[in-house]
Amino acid sequence: MQPTSAGQVLVVDDDLAIRETLREALEDEGYEVFEAADGLAALRALRASTRRMVVLLDLMMPQLDGEGVLVTVVGDRQLARHVYFLVTAKRNAISDSLRPLLQRLM
């Protein structure tokens, strides 16, 4: 019998080393982990998911950045069912334009 998953997590980051590190740590805690290297891949994965996911979302990525993903989430009820955590290595990365968007997601 396989152990049950603690839940599903989508790690969205363009840095492969960060994705791998987070994957290993989360899998060690029993989570089923999926990865996306940019916002467009993340949106595809989230739309395809049949279960609610926790999303660790990097702000600065190519193709579609974290803010672009959140703009899409606000207008899409299917995407809004997931839980989003912003992740960034840049200090003070929350821009003035991002603050109202985050308020709408709360």
Image (cartoon, helix red, strand yellow):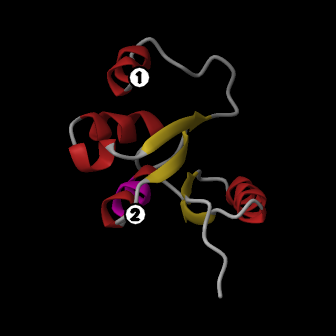
Residue at the spot 43% in from the left edge and 50% down from the top edge: 39
The quadrant holding residue 104 is: top left
> Looking at the picture, how far across and down is residue 106, in whole percent?
39, 24
Above or below residue 14? Residue 31 is below
Determine if the magenta segment contains residue 31: no
Give the mark, 2 or 1, whose residue is nearer the N terminus.
2
> Looking at the picture, how far across and down is residue 95, in whole percent?
49, 16
* Amino acid marked by disc 2: Ala
Furthest-front residue in this view: 1
Disc 1 residue crowd, few under 14, some 14–19, many 20+, Cα 10 Å: some
Residue at the spot 41% in from the left edge and 22% down from the top edge: 102
| Res. 45 mark | 2
Which sits in the foreground, 86 or 95?
Answer: 86
Furthest-bottom residue in this view: 1
In the picture, which quadrant includes the N terminus? bottom right
Cα–Cα gap, marks 2 and 1: 21 Å
Q: How many marks?
A: 2
* Amino acid marked by disc 1: Leu
Q: Is residue 82 left or right of residue 55?
A: left
Q: Main secondary structure of the magenta part?
A: helix
> Looking at the picture, how far across and down is residue 83, in whole percent?
46, 42
- Element assignment for label 2: helix
Q: Is residue 11 left or right of residue 106?
A: right
Q: Is residue 65 visible?
A: no
Residue at the spot 35% in from the left edge and 62% down from the top edge: 44
Q: Is residue 102 visible?
A: yes
Identify the residue under disc 1: 102
Residue at the spot 67% in from the left edge and 27% down from the top edge: 90
| Res. 37 mark | none
Magenta-tinted stretch? 40-44
- Element assignment for label 1: helix
Above or below residue 92? Residue 105 is below
